[in-house]
Image (cartoon, rainbow, N blue to C red):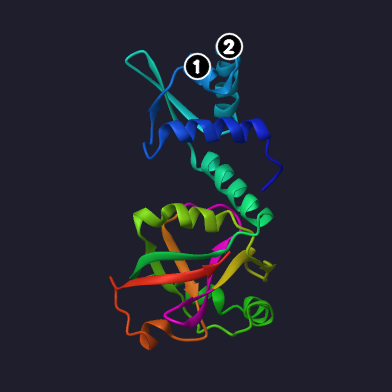
Amino acid sequence: MKSIDPYDYWTLKTIKRIMGKNPWISLSSRELGEKLSVSQQSASRIILKLIDKGFLQRKIKDRRQNLSITDAGLDILFYEMNDLASVLEIEKTMEIRGNVISGLGEGRYYISRKSYIIQFQEKLGFIPFLGTLNVKIDPENEGKLRRLRNSTGIHIDGFVTDDRTFGPVKAFLGSIEGLQCAAILPERSVYSDVLEIISPFYLREKLKLSDGASISLFVNI
């Protein structure tokens, strides 16, 4: 992620603190200005700047300004959270819970590419079973998933073949019921509640998992 304006971060953090778990909050420029210790006019300009950057959404309801932080805005908060955790050397193992679902077979196609397999072996220490375990993340764990998306991970280079381009991905080593695995995500931001897991084992068979089965992934970030 490119360099973040500290004031953007501080403003988004302040708005998020007021919002709590609510997706939208009624908040006037005057009220925000009081929280930021700036004038109403300055707060209004800050809001417009964050809207222009794609970090905030605004709608007017009953003549009141309502604000919501976008996915891009939340990414800033989680990116800074990860950066601070790194500076303070906070424990970086995270448990993410979800349920097994069926995929469309795309995972098998992608991870079977030779250029990916070579890097998985070199950087993750294993050659994966040719298929992914797809896990739909529990709603209460979506914040953890977003934190994972905004972590650096282990970089896997993209490459170009005669007929298409395969993008770079990042991987996070972890385990499910003690079995080695890794979560893989595209490096470009994709907002999805499904996480793809690779492993040297056929996890569905090894752990006797069927669709709907609840699992816990312990992942290193």
Under circle 2, the secondary element is: helix
On screen, residue 154 versus residue 135, left or right, reads right
On screen, residue 124 versus residue 147, left or right, reads right
First to last magenta residue range: 174-191
Mark sitting on residue 200:
none
Specify the quadrant that holds the C terminus: bottom right
Query: Residue sitting at 63 percent across and 64 percent down?
Result: 153
Closer to us: 204 or 26: 26
Quadrant assignment, res 76:
top right
Q: Position of residue 99 (x, y in %)?
A: 33, 68
Q: Which residue is mark 2?
A: 41
- Name the amino acid type tagged 2: Gln
Query: Residue sitting at 29 percent across and 73 percent down?
Result: 211
Residue 145 on the magenta span: no
Query: Residue sitting at 44 percent across and 31 percent down?
Result: 18
Tell me which secondary structure the magenta stretch mostly adopts.
strand
Q: Earlier in the sequence, mark 1 or mark 2?
A: 1
Q: Position of residue 110 (x, y in %)?
A: 54, 73
Closer to us: 176 or 131: 176
Q: Position of residue 53 (x, y in %)?
A: 60, 32
On screen, residue 175 versus residue 154, left or right, reads left
Mark sitting on residue 29:
1
Closer to us: 84 or 70: 84
